[in-house]
Image (cartoon, rainbow, N blue to C red):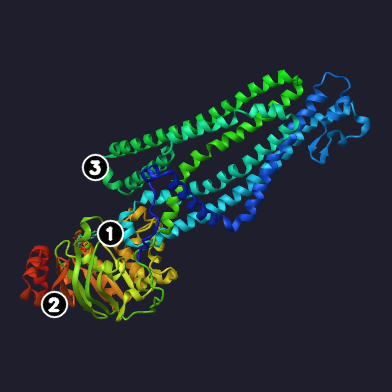
Amino acid sequence: MPNPDKKKKVSRKDFANLSNKEAMALAGETYRKLYGYLKPYRWRFVGGQLMGILAGLTNVLLIQGMKVIFEVVLSNDASAASKAESFKFGFGKVSFNPTDLFPAEWLGSYQLVIAACLVVPLVFLLRGGFTYLANYMLMWVGNRILYDLRNDTYRALLGQSMNYFSKAKVGQMVQTVFNQSRVAQQNLVTLSQDIIQRPVSIIAILATLLHMNPGFTFYSLVVFPLCILPVVYIGKKVRSAGAQEEQEAGQMMVQMTECFQGIRVVKSHAREEFEHKRFEASNMKTNKLIMRYQKALELVGMLVEFVASLGVGIGLYYAWKTHIDAGTFMTLVGGLTQIYPHTKSLSRIQLVTQKTIVATSNVFAVMEEEPEVQDATDAQDLKRSTGRLTFRNVGFSYKSGKSGQRSAVNGINLEMQPGKFYALVGPTGAGKSTLFSLIQRFYDVDEGAVELDGIDIRKLTQKSLRNQIGVVSQDAFLFHDTIQENIRYGRLDATPEEIQRAAVQAHVDDFVKDKKDGYDTIVGDGGGNLSGGQKQRVTIARAILRNAPILLLDEATSALDTETERIIQDAIHVLSEGKTVIAIAHRLSTILEADQIIVMENGHVHSAGTHQELLEKSDLYQRLYHLQYETSADRAAIEANAI
Ligand SMILES: Nc1ncnc2c1ncn2[C@@H]1O[C@H](COP(=O)(O)OP(=O)(O)OP(=O)(O)O)[C@@H](O)[C@H]1O
Ligand SMILES: [Mg+2]
């Protein structure tokens, strides 16, 4: 059962409409889930953050180093040593005098100047080292999280029922597994870096400056709270631009995948230009949104920096008033400007979060979506079925959209015996394909039950149920791989000899012989490099290899030439041996061979029997037979056979 409390996907429209409180709640919940992904790597994460903090703390050394340089190297005063005492700095009882590092006789000497000159490169080396370690560790954690997120999202999507895929768009799914998971990962790692490391750097620099000159620092920072204004103002304006961009990028992906999936239709209608225009429109929209968002980011950064720099002006005035010397002033201003990049990053956090939260919550929504069809907790693992299928008063309707409530099949009662051949016939929309879906439990029935060997298929694991079923469908789908691998898909542990045997039985061997690469021939996307009849034979070989006790056969509606038809018919004979076969029949030869023909109409079984019986008792069958099956060629063939 779908969980009624499950969180819906958040679209940009929803997001823009959320109240601040709801947006906060969504963010909180999303981060809680992200933390679950971080947890296994938390120590490395903490290590990375610590390294980042240490890198931030080197700013303090840099400011102090600058002071040393101003007073020792750039001082016009010949006796720098006289100022050595003023280098002393520290907090409370812990104090440190840089000149302690050098022998006393160095004071005021050439060596001291050289040592001072080395301060900057050394501090940078230290900072670089810490930064490297921090980035390395956090990147490692980030990539692991991305790996986990992608795996989990992909698995969750694969686990969805057929109903999900009839609504989902391929492009959107690709976007979620591939891009939104990356955004989620960045959301966690990059943002946490900003939230943890930036404030530490700011506080450390501030503390140093306050210690050096509390008055100057205080006056310079008086205007600092004003920085919040551009953040709030601009943040509000672009609230949904970032989120919208995410959505639009998904749309672009949808357009692209759909176009390539339908490339034959596109080409045959010469709609390249049209498709390109559609893509271009989406591309342009995304581009505009990105620009709007990035403009906002830059604007916030610039304004925050500007507001902060106003403080320098005030500080300058204070410096003039209190006669601070140029060296100290330069050090203080240098320190102050080091705060700006951190403030800038912090001020952007809100914008970045707004952008990433939609993508991130989508990733989790996809992961948490409960598949409609699920294994029961005590589901049975069926080893090998005899192939007895029963429909007990089955009713089912598709639940898609508002109009989908009309029942697709109802009141179906059927008993299908092992080893027998059943043909399903009926006008279009009668419910034939729906029965196939129900046998495979792509959907759960609304009424009654489908039973295999007398067991309700809802009591079996989906895997073991589907292992009992082989399918040859009209839209013979092949993977972009070799013929050999496409056959192997039927049973992954099959040996090359078994594959070969199945290929011979399905008459795949006949045409593979003519191919340069033989069984290693790549069939192209969806099997595009093979003919329709060849593709069918490959799927039949796949089904032979699978050797399942039940066979669902959806015959191709397209006419095949007599030779191909004969070959395929022959292959199907091999395949059908000893199996319960249910065929949606489009060929006369199929219905003539069937042990029983089931005539469907409007979702129910109209009548059943052999060809002769039905010709006598069913008007519908007679009509179908004359209209659909009995072409003049067929009649000639029957007459020829009859003689
Ligand atoms: N995924 C779906 N969602 C909603 N309705 C569906 C879906 N698939 C089929 N239907 C509807 O269910 C009814 C039965 O369709 P079904 O595909 O079983 O017919 P069919 O007998 O296989 O027809 P055909 O001979 O044309 O293949 C039809 O009215 C169809 O429109
Ligand atoms: Mg059908």
Question: What mark, if any, has residue 368 been given in the picture?
Answer: none
Q: Position of residue 530 (x, y in %)?
A: 32, 56
Left or right of 342? Residue 424 is: left
Among the two numbered marks 1 and 2 on one chain, the one whose residue lies closer to the N terminus: 1
Q: Position of residue 361 (x, y in %)?
A: 44, 51
Nearest to viewer (mark 3 / mark 2): 2
Three-letter code, disc 2: Gly
Q: Position of residue 184 (x, y in %)?
A: 49, 49
Question: What mark, if any, has residue 269 been given in the picture?
Answer: 3
Who's the residue at 24% across and 81% down the image?
Answer: 417
Nearest to viewer (mark 1 / mark 2): 2
Along the line of sight, which residue is nearer the eye, 437 or 30? 30
Along the line of sight, which residue is nearer the eye, 89 or 601? 89
Among the two numbered marks 3 and 1 on one chain, the one whose residue lies closer to the N terminus: 3
Question: What mark, if any, has residue 475 been given in the picture?
Answer: 1
Asked if the residues shown at circle 3 and circle 2 are in contact, with their CB atoms under 8 angstroms apart, the answer is no
Three-letter code, disc 3: His
Pointer 2 residue: 609
Who's the residue at 48% across and 48% down the image?
Answer: 27
Q: Quadrant of residue 213?
A: top right
Left or right of 89? Residue 437 is: left
Marks 1 and 2, how far apart in space? 28 Å
Q: Quadrant of residue 207?
A: top right
Which quadrant is the C terminus positioned in?
Answer: bottom left
